């Protein structure tokens, strides 16, 4: 073992001398046209004796250098040195999106278009294009050479070399530099450098550098004037700076999903509106710099320029002064008083008041490859069609979807069997499980307890199926964790007139005998106008309740479907669920880490 180690050490020493000698000869001769491997073989005969390499070591080394693998790698390296590879463009994701929009209409009559559409939509192909665009968008070239006059100015500078620097940059007319300034002790200091901008790619300026002169002219202490001067400049620009010697941090791979819309043109607090980044609720943003307390630097994950967005701290302060919208139930609500059975709402509803005042700014997310969600949660007001959509999924895909059997403390009826529609348990046992936190949600109706047990959800998931839950929205806080990994779909009620027409069509077709609160009025022959008014009251309550749920819990929703047509709503839901098996998904980061 020691003998082999000593031989390897001698061979390594000889190899270092060999390549140093080759590099030294190349420097003395200039750009040699002689192949590199031939120079290495020639130097094998001229190795000094100080390497202590024996003839056997040199033979061993020559065998390595003459192996086909090493020779092939050398040829590839020399070929790459002679070739200059440049990307044709760095926006291939946008190009593919345009292609997909064009060929979607051709898939019906052309099988080749269908196959191309499938290939272009595959996650691996999309990731490959994204990686290519990221590499292509970076600047791998050296900065432009400094003008001789600038070099002379540096050499003749009276100040010390570490106290002032002359920086030469080259820009096109109208091209943004990607830098903002602030005033500090009557000096203009670089406040931030936008990630991916021209200054960031060149790496010559840093945050904290003091700008003294631009093309030989003093800049004063007005950031707006300096921005105008730099904006009008084109070609070579010479900057005299006092460096800060602050190393810039490596941009983190942090992605967030905003829960609000933002337009920098309407923001009076942003330091530079042209540097702002507009986004919509639900977009995916990459945060590249969070050093500023009030303004982060971000870009859309699909590509594009970096811009400023309000930080979590700033947006929380701003929204704290905006009053929350009052939950209005409409002018018709409360006009008819009907006898209702005593019903206690779910205990999780105690958090409803806190949920309505919870500030939702940004949510950190991570990209996951296609996978099957453990639960499918349907949220919506009563009577919007959640149960109908759930039953269709269970009937059409019993091998993919399942639903838990609810628990109740009431006694079974004659035609009921335990475990089919309900799990019948004694009230005392159910109350004990409620105290132990075994239920996702529970409530009391007509003196009996009802609820969904957490263990029953796991039983469905353990069979390899997605568990469909039709629950109260307050339970979303408990469900939206890595334990359940829910896909939350909000079934929204349509507009009042549309909902009224849909309800009338269902009743006329005889699909239901329950016509809201006017059923008893019609059976008793009461005034039809009062009956219709009662229907309007209940339908209006349904619309208002749907709007309230959407305002309070929309930051939990992955998909919103307006159920103005049950068949259309089902096809939309089914298409979205199929995408979960074929497309990457953005999920909360705490599901992954």
Image (tube, grey):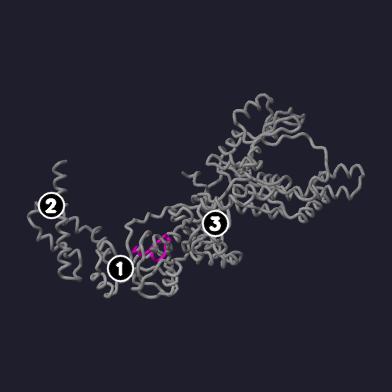
Label 2 to label 3: alpha-carbon separation: 62 Å
Label 2 to label 1: alpha-carbon separation: 52 Å
Residue receiving disc 3: 283
Q: Nearer the viewer, mark 2 or mark 1?
A: 1
Q: Quadrant of residue 481?
A: top right
Query: Is mark 2 in CB contact (under 8 Å) with mark 1?
Result: no
Labels 3 and 1: the sequence-earlier one: 1
In the image, farthest residue toward the front = 186
Residue 356 location in percent, x, y? 64, 45
Label 3 to label 1: alpha-carbon separation: 41 Å
Q: Secondary structure at mark 2?
A: helix
Query: Is mark 3 in CB contact (under 8 Å) with mark 1?
Result: no
User: Which residues make up the magenta segment?
Assistant: 190-204
Please report the residue visible at 43 percent of the width from the left and 61 percent of the height from the top.
Answer: 182
Q: Can residue 368 be seen by looking at this rendering?
A: no
Residue 293 or residue 94, whichever sits in front: 293
Q: Is residue 98 left or right of residue 427?
A: left
Q: Is residue 198 magenta?
A: yes
Residue receiving disc 1: 166
Q: Can residue 225 be seen by looking at this rendering?
A: yes
Q: Is residue 359 left or right of residue 160?
A: right
Mark 3 closeness class: few <14, some 14–19, many ≥20 residues within 10 Å: some
């Amino acid at each position: 073992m020691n003998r082999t180690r000593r031989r390897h050490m001698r061979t390594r020493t000889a190899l270092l001398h060999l390549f140093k000698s080759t590099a030294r000869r190349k420097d003395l001769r200039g750009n040699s046209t002689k192949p590199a491997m031939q120079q290495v073989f020639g130097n094998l005969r001229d190795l000094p004796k100080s390497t202590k390499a024996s003839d056997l070591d040199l033979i061993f080394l020559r065998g390595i250098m003459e192996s086909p693998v090493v020779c092939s790698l050398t040829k590839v390296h020399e070929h790459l040195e002679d070739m200059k590879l440049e990307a044709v463009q760095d926006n291939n994701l946008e190009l593919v999106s345009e292609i997909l929009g064009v060929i979607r209409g051709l898939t019906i009559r052309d099988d080749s278009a269908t196959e191309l559409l499938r290939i272009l939509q595959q996650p691996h192909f999309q990731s490959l294009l994204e990686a290519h665009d990221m590499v292509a968008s970076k600047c791998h070239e050296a900065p432009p050479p400094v003008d001789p006059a600038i070099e002379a100015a540096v050499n003749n500078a009276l100040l010390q070399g570490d106290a002032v620097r002359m920086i030469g940059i080259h820009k096109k007319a109208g091209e943004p530099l990607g830098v903002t300034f602030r005033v500090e002790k009557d000096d203009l200091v670089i406040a931030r450098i936008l990630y991916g901008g021209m200054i960031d790619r060149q790496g010559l300026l840093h945050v904290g550098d003091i700008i003294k002169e631009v093309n030989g002219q003093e800049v004063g202490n007005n950031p707006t004037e300096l921005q105008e001067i730099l904006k009008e400049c084109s070609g070579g620009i010479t900057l005299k700076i006092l460096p800060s010697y602050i190393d810039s941090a490596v941009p983190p791979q942090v992605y967030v999903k905003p829960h609000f819309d933002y337009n920098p043109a309407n923001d009076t607090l942003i330091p530079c509106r042209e540097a702002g980044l507009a986004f919509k609720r639900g977009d995916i943003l990459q945060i590249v710099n969070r050093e500023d307390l009030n303004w982060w630097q971000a870009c859309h994950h699909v590509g594009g320029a970096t811009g400023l967005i309000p930080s979590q701290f700033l947006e929380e302060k701003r929204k704290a002064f905006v009053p929350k919208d009052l939950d209005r139930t409409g002018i018709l609500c409360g006009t008819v008083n009907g006898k209702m059975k005593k019903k206690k709402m779910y205990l999780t509803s105690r958090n409803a008041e806190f949920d309505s005042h919870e500030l939702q700014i940004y949510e950190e997310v991570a990209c996951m490859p296609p996978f099957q969600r453990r639960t499918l949660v349907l949220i919506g007001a009563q009577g919007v069609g959640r149960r109908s959509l759930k039953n269709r999924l269970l009937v059409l895909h019993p091998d993919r979807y399942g639903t838990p059997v609810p628990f109740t403390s009431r006694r079974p009826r004659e035609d009921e069997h335990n475990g089919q529609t309900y799990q019948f348990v004694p009230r005392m046992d159910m109350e004990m499980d409620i105290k132990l936190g075994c239920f996702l949600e529970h409530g009391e109706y007509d003196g009996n307890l009802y609820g969904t047990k957490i263990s029953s959800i796991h039983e469905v998931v353990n069979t390899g199926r997605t568990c469909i839950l039709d629950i109260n929205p307050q339970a979303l806080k408990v469900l939206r964790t890595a334990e359940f990994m829910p896909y939350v779909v909000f079934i929204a009620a349509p507009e009042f007139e549309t909902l009224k027409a849909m309800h009338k069509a269902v009743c006329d077709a005889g699909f239901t005998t329950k016509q809201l609160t006017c059923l008893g009025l019609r059976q008793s022959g009461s005034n039809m106008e009062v009956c219709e008014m009662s229907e309007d009251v209940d339908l209006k309550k349904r619309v208002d309740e749907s709007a309230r749920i959407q305002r309070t819990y929309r930051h939990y929703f992955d998909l919103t479907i307006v159920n103005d047509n049950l068949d259309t709503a089902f096809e939309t839901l089914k298409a979205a669920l199929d995408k979960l098996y074929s497309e990457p998904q953005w999920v909360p980061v705490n599901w992954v880490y």
